[in-house]
Structure formats: C-alpha cells, structure tokens
Amino acid sequence: MLEIGLPVLVAGLLILASHIPLGYQVLKRGIVFIDLAIAQVAALGTVLVSQVHWHDNNQWLIQGIAVLFALLGVGLVAWINRSFPEWREAFIGLIYVTAASALVLLVAGQPKGGQLLTRTLSGDILWLSWQDLTLLALVAVGVQLLAHIWPEKLERFFYLVFAVTITLSVVKAGIYLVFVCLIAPALASIVHNRSKAWSYLVGSMGFVVGLTAAWLYDLPAAACVVVSVILSLLIALGLQQRFGRMEAVTQTPS
C-alpha cells in the first residue's frame, strides 16, 4: 500500500501546493469556471496529439501540446475578461462546452473512446510513480515562490502560470480533481476570513481520507478524493462557524 499510495499522496500534496495560491487568485478575480474551461481545452490538445502516430508516445511532446492549447485558451479568456467583463462567466462556460463537445467528436467511434473520456475527467492518479512527480514538484515550488516572495509577479503573469500549472495537473490527475483542488481548499480560508492554513489542512485531509477509501474499497481514486475534499471543506466551514459563534459569545460584554 505504501509503495503505491505514498507517491500518489505526495503528488496530491504537490498539486495542492501549486493550486491553492492560484485558487485565491481565481476567487479574487471572480473567474471560477476558468479552471474547468482551460483544463478541458488542455485535455482536448492532449487527446488530439495522442491520435497522431508520429509522436511515438513522447510524453514531453504531448504535455507541450497540451500547454500550448491551454495558453491559447487563457489568451482567449484574458481577451474576454477585458472586452466583456460582465459576461465573462458565460463566455468561459461556452469555451468549456465547446472543448468538451470537440473532445467527444474526436473520440467518437473509437473502441476505447469512452475510457479515454473518463481518463480525461478522472485521471489515473492512483498509478503515478515517483518519476511522474518531477514536473509537479517544480511547478509547486515555482508557484509557492511567486505567491510568497514575488506576489506582484503572480498577479502580472497569472494567466501564464495558471495555464502551465493546470495543464500539467490535468495530465496527471484529471479535470475533476484539478478543479476541486483549486476551489475547495481556497474557500476554506476565504469564506470566514480564516488563516490560509485551513486551505492546506482541508486539502491534505481530503487527499488522505479519499485515497484511503479508494484503496480499502477498490473505488476510483480521483472521485473518492473529490468527494472527500468537499466533505472536508464542509466540516471545516461548520467548525469555523461554530467557533466563530463561541468567540462572539465570549467577547460579548455581560
């Protein structure tokens, strides 16, 4: 269990380390569904290049094409944000639907098309090895440095950093898991204006419990982690609200 599960857990912690700072930016900018849209565009690029046989299953090429598609997607989102700020969520939703539909058309008629679609959504995180973590680690360190040492650069180059980070994570973990890691932990700190430590606690607990449940009951790992992270968020918000009321009562003058 440790031989298989430990690298997966480390991968999850690395994804959290890179996604939580970006999640704060996403919520601050009010572009929540950008993650789903860009992740779907990146997945479209991954599947598109995987259908071409001249790449000889070169993972660097596949990831490079996925990043290129993601950069095109965030470029489009940035233009929409400037040109139609009041309608940006609607346009971002259309980008997601368009990329998802194009992906369905791309794999239509293929014997393993359904499996390919499922993999883009849920990923294969349970089968990651230590060798698969190099890029995730580099991105996590880079995002953390930007967030804590050069926050102004993260603000300035947000779309570029976002595209690269989301794409590499989607290739490893799938769209659903990437989305929940971006949004749910950040909410744990923002909703009641609590310490950012809550974000990392919620994300870490969600991964540990979700992966344990997946291993013990032979369930899809990504789906278990998604549900577990959301449950961890709800529990954290409930605890924060309860403690907040207790603090208000104790501070009320008699």
Image (tube, grey):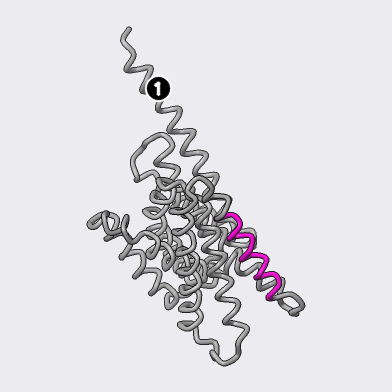
**Residue that label 1 marks:** 246
Confirm whether the magenta stretch covers residue 97. Answer: yes
What residue is rendered at 49% in x and 51% in y? 84
Quadrant where the C terminus sits is: top left
Quick check: can you spot residue 1? no
Q: Which residues are magenta?
A: 92-106
What residue is rendered at 50% in x and 72% in y? 69
Residue 83 in the image: x percent, y percent? 47, 53
What residue is rendered at 52% in x and 71% in y? 171
Left or right: where 199 falls relative to 103: left
Residue type highlighted by circle 1: Met
Majority secondary structure of magenta residues: helix
- 243 is higher (above) or lower (below) than 35: above
Question: Camera-side residue: 27 or 79?
Answer: 79
Residue 21 in the image: x percent, y percent? 36, 53
| SS for dot 1 | helix
Left or right: where 41 falls relative to 23: right
Place residue 220 in its image quadrant. Answer: bottom right
Residue furthest to the left: 149
Question: Camera-side residue: 138 or 157?
Answer: 157
Place residue 239 in its image quadrant. Answer: top left
Question: Camera-side residue: 212 or 97?
Answer: 97
Place residue 28 in its image quadrant. Answer: top left
- 108 is higher (above) or lower (below) than 21: below
